[in-house]
Image (spheres, rainbow, N blue to C red):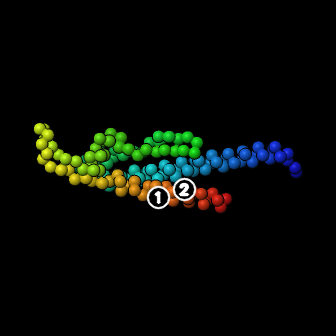
Amino acid sequence: MSMPIEKMESELMEILRDYQDLTDEEMEQVVKKTANTVKNAIKQEAPRDTERYKDSWATKKTTSKRHKTVITIHSKNRYQLTHLLENGHKLTDRNGNKIGDVKEIPHIAPATENADKELMYQLRKLYKKKAKL
């Protein structure tokens, strides 16, 4: 059975678009999975003086365009504390006199440190899986 070259070209382009859409969806899933891993690591290491700060961590899809997915990891309602807890701060009285220091409790940086490596690892794994097909 013969097929005109124009028809073959359009069929091939349709197959490639379908493959690309499938790959985009799978890549988005990898990004979501990595973001959730980081969020859970932050929750695990977050200070536990109150459970509200630990439980405030969430992920939110910030951008979702073709070939691009951005997921933000953030504290929903305790965002004011993140910098103070992560980096420490001075403690003052009502008159502004220093009365002590609050030691830093690193919990965000350690969780995000390996996120890029993990994301690249998962994407390479997906690519190798697709290359075998």
Q: x, y (%) of residue 13?
A: 73, 45
Q: Amino acid at mark 1?
A: Lys
Residue at (81% x, 44% y) in the render: 7
Q: Residues within 10 Å of mark 2 (few under 14, many from 20)?
A: some
Of residue 37 and residue 92, the one placed in the foreground of this image is 92
Dot 2 or dot 1: first in sequence order is 1
Residue at (44% x, 55% y) in the render: 115
Q: Which residue appears farthest toward the right when viewing the image? A: 1
Q: Amino acid at mark 2?
A: Leu
Q: x, y (%) of residue 88?
A: 24, 50
- Can you identify the residue that label 2 sits on? 123
Residue at (12% x, 42% y) in the render: 97
**Number of the label disc, if any, that sits on residue 117:** 1
Q: Secondary structure at mark 2?
A: helix
Q: x, y (%) of residue 62?
A: 47, 40
Residue 48 visible here: no
Q: Secondary structure at mark 1?
A: helix
